Amino acid sequence: MGHERDSWLGRVRMAALPPLDSLYVFTVAARHLSFTAAAAELHRTQSAVSHRIKALEAEVGVQLFTRTARGLKLTPAGEVLARRVGRAITEMGRAIAELGETSATRTLRVTMLPSVASRWLMPRLPRFCELHRHVQVQVIADSRILDLRSEGIDLAIRFGRGRYRDHVATLLMHDWVLPVCSSQLLAPRDPITSIDALLELPLLHDSSTEGDGSLSDWRSWLDQLGRPELRCESGQHLSHAGLSIEAAVVGLGVALARVSLVTDHLTQGTLISPLPLTTATAFAYYLVAPPEVAELPKTVLFSRWLHAEAEETVRLATHIAHPTPSFTLTNS
């Protein structure tokens, strides 16, 4: 079977190459194993994608897809073509992207959640700009998961599980959550020494984490600490982590915050942890890039700098996340 595939591919090499657009449509359809999904990505109709694949099959003289009860499946010849053409298109994309790397000023577009942009990247970004003035960083803060290729974005910082199909993903850092508030909120009160006492304070909720599987919300925190019977629904609900942290800074209540986003506040004293019980999040931060730009000098340079900054954040976060306990899990 392998010899037949190789001999078929050899005949195609000797023949005139099909149109590049047809090959690109084929690789997208092969990646999704769905003409409908390919059409959505390519902004074409399903019928147009189907006709283009049929024309390609007629031109190369080989069937590339078969239909099964579960949907589309690549034939052996289709698997070979998808693998090799996919590599070729990636190399072409990388070569075209590198053409712009000869300019004195290089622009790198990076996207992330608004909370990560404002509470983690922006306080650190001036250090990168001072070290590498020839790279211009454009920060795109968006709560949506943007399509990097269609939006022309080079790099993303994602908070998730690390599964990003058809992209290069590298772990940036893990994270934890812990309660934080302003010192003024605690001034008229006795020291907080138990979870029960903590929950008597006004709570601030990051609504975006509730039910997202990241284990970054109050209910997940209590469950992980073995107190699932306690109620934590009361308090103000805010749309994202940045707002709940700022609400804590101005004294509106206690936020359950990711340590990475409040390390600066905690070291500067603008926030304190009334009960430094920390639990790990199920998500971590990943750097995600399309393969064709992942190895460009500007992307590699910025990624290495991000990893260095993340290492320092984790060092501080580990110290914060593992304090000497002076509290109890229940009221005494």
Image (spheres, rainbow, N blue to C red):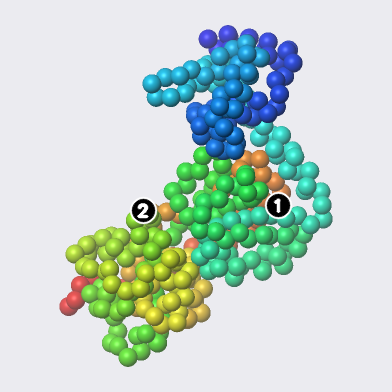
Q: Amino acid at mark 2?
A: Gly
Residue 283: image quadrant is bottom left
Q: Is residue 77 left or right of residue 176?
A: right
**Residue 230: image location, x then y, percent:** 21, 68
Spatial CA span between label 1 and label 2 = 33 Å
Q: Is residue 308 above or below residue 188?
A: above
Q: Which residue is mark 1?
A: 298
Q: Is residue 117 left or right of residue 197?
A: right
Secondary structure beneath disc 1? Answer: helix
Q: Is residue 149 above or below residue 132?
A: above
Q: Residue at x 30, y 79 (%)?
A: 201
Secondary structure beneath disc 2? Answer: loop
Q: Is residue 194 above or below residue 155?
A: below
Q: Which of the two marks, 1 or 2, is nearer to us in this view?
A: 2
**Residue 158: image location, x then y, percent:** 51, 53
Q: Residue at x 26, y 60 (%)?
A: 223
Report the front residue among 156 and 224. 156
Q: Which residue is mark 2?
A: 213
- Closer to the chain start, of discs 1 and 2, is 2
Report the front residue among 59 and 6. 59
Residue 275: image quadrant is bottom left
Q: Which mark is residue 28?
A: none
Q: Is residue 98 left or right of residue 4?
A: right
Q: Inspect this view and state whether residue 243 appears.
A: yes
Q: Inspect this view and state whether residue 307 appears.
A: no
